[in-house]
């Protein structure tokens, strides 16, 4: 757990029911010792995978208004910033202004960016967000956690091998971030997923990979959980290899528990629905606080 006063501002989506965005990130961060403040880029009744959803979308004026309220009360001095799903160009540009202001207030601020843009070859945000991430957001980020497709979007590279993944990660380092983690990729072998990580320390790069089992289901909110846990364990352990192992071990424990519960609820031979597949975060409290390391990160 964080052994010093850690205060994080998390800017991403939220839902009334279920666990994505800030709902997926806040509980783990609180368990791991972070005081969490949230700004919700969107507020929906439930995640969009249900097919039906209702709610509100904040615009750039809304996020500026909320941040100005924090500034006026001098309660904007955070140690960490986490961003996830943001759906409009103007909102993302305004977040860029906020990051710059927060770094003026606290030059040692750690900014973790999950550049949520798409997956499996498909963008689910407007394409006009991509240049804002590349030109404005990434140069401000300390840690980024794209998936394979998002890393390809940001670098313009196809990633079909470990070597190509490492080249893409070098490109991402050159854009600004000290630590680059590709949270998931299809580069694993024998039905596994591979995560790759790289960090610059004293002018040298440390690189790792870790493979973990692919479970036969679609989970929502796991990327948000990944970024939150990685930020927490990087703060606590200061070592990328250890943080990666703890993060992925936590994720695997959560999704295994989720799938077991969902299958029990759905009954034999039935496919679980979206509500049954919501992450079992609260029931995974012990796994979040003290993950059992079952997957080891291999140095590259």
Image: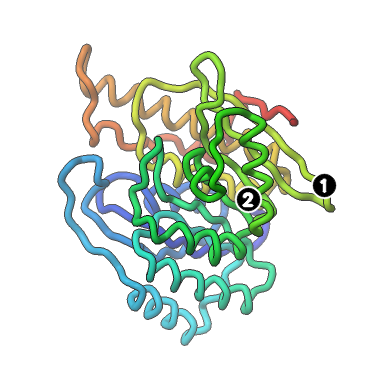
Q: Is residue 189 above or below residue 160?
A: above
Residue 73's x, y, as percent? 48, 85
Q: Are marks 1 and 2 in contact (CB under 8 Å)?
A: no
Image quarter in which the C terminus is found:
top right
Which residue occupies 23% across, 36% down? 275
Which residue occupies 70% across, 37% down? 241
Q: Is residue 190 above or below residue 171?
A: above
Q: Nearer the viewer, mark 1 or mark 2?
A: 2
Residue 162: name its quadrant: top right
Which residue occupies 72% across, 48% down? 238
Q: How dense is the environment of label 2, judged by Cα within 10 Å: few (below 14), some, or many (20 and up)? A: many
Kindly identify which residue carries mark 2.
Answer: 172
Residue 179's x, y, as percent? 67, 50
Residue 174's x, y, as percent? 68, 55
What element does badge 1 sit on? Answer: strand
Along the viewing direction, whichever of 86 and 164 lies nearer the viewer: 164
Which residue occupies 82% across, 47% down? 204
Residue 78's x, y, as percent? 57, 69
Kindly identify which residue carries mark 1.
Answer: 204
Q: Earlier in the sequence, mark 1 or mark 2?
A: 2
What element does badge 2 sit on? Answer: helix
- Lateral position of residue 221 relative to residue 17, left or right: right
- Lateral position of residue 107 relative to residue 59, left or right: right
Along the viewing direction, whichever of 135 and 41 lies nearer the viewer: 135
Please tell me how many numbered marks the rendered image carries. Answer: 2
Q: CA distance from mark 1 to mark 2?
A: 15 Å
Q: Is residue 163 above or below residue 133?
A: above
Along the viewing direction, whichever of 282 and 149 lies nearer the viewer: 149
- Lateral position of residue 279 relative to residue 224, left or right: left
Q: How dense is the environment of label 1, judged by Cα within 10 Å: few (below 14), some, or many (20 and up)? A: few
Q: Which mark is residue 74?
A: none
Specify how the rendered protein is coloured.
rainbow
């Amino acid at each position: 757990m964080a052994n010093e006063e850690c205060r994080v501002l998390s800017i991403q989506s939220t839902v009334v029911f279920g666990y994505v965005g800030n709902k997926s990130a806040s509980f783990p961060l609180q368990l791991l010792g972070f005081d969490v403040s949230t700004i919700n880029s969107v507020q929906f009744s439930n995640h969009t995978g249900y097919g039906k959803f209702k709610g509100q979308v904040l615009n750039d004026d809304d996020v500026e208004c909320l941040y100005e309220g924090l500034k006026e009360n001098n309660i904007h001095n955070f140690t960490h910033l986490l961003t996830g799903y943001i759906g409009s160009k103007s909102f993302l540009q305004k977040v860029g202004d906020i990051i710059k202001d927060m770094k003026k207030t606290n030059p040692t601020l750690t900014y973790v960016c999950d550049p949520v843009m798409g997956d499996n070859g498909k963008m689910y945000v407007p394409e006009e967000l991509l240049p804002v991430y590349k030109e404005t957001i990434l140069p401000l980020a300390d840690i980024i956690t794209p998936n394979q497709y998002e890393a390809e979007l940001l670098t313009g590279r196809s990633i079909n091998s470990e070597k190509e993944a490492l080249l893409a990660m070098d490109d991402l380092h050159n854009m600004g971030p000290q630590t680059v983690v590709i949270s998931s990729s299809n580069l694993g072998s024998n039905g596994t997923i591979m995560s790759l990580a790289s960090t610059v320390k004293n002018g040298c790069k440390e690189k790792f990979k870790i493979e973990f089992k692919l479970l036969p289901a679609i989970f929502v909110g796991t990327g948000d959980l990944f970024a939150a846990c990685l930020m927490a364990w990087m703060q606590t352990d200061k070592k990328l290899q250890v943080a990666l192992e703890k993060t992925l071990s936590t994720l695997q424990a959560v999704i295994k528990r989720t799938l077991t519960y969902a299958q029990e609820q759905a009954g034999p031979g039935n496919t679980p629905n979206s509500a049954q597949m919501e992450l079992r975060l609260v029931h995974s409290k012990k796994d979040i606080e003290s993950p059992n390391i079952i997957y080891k990160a291999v140095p590259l």
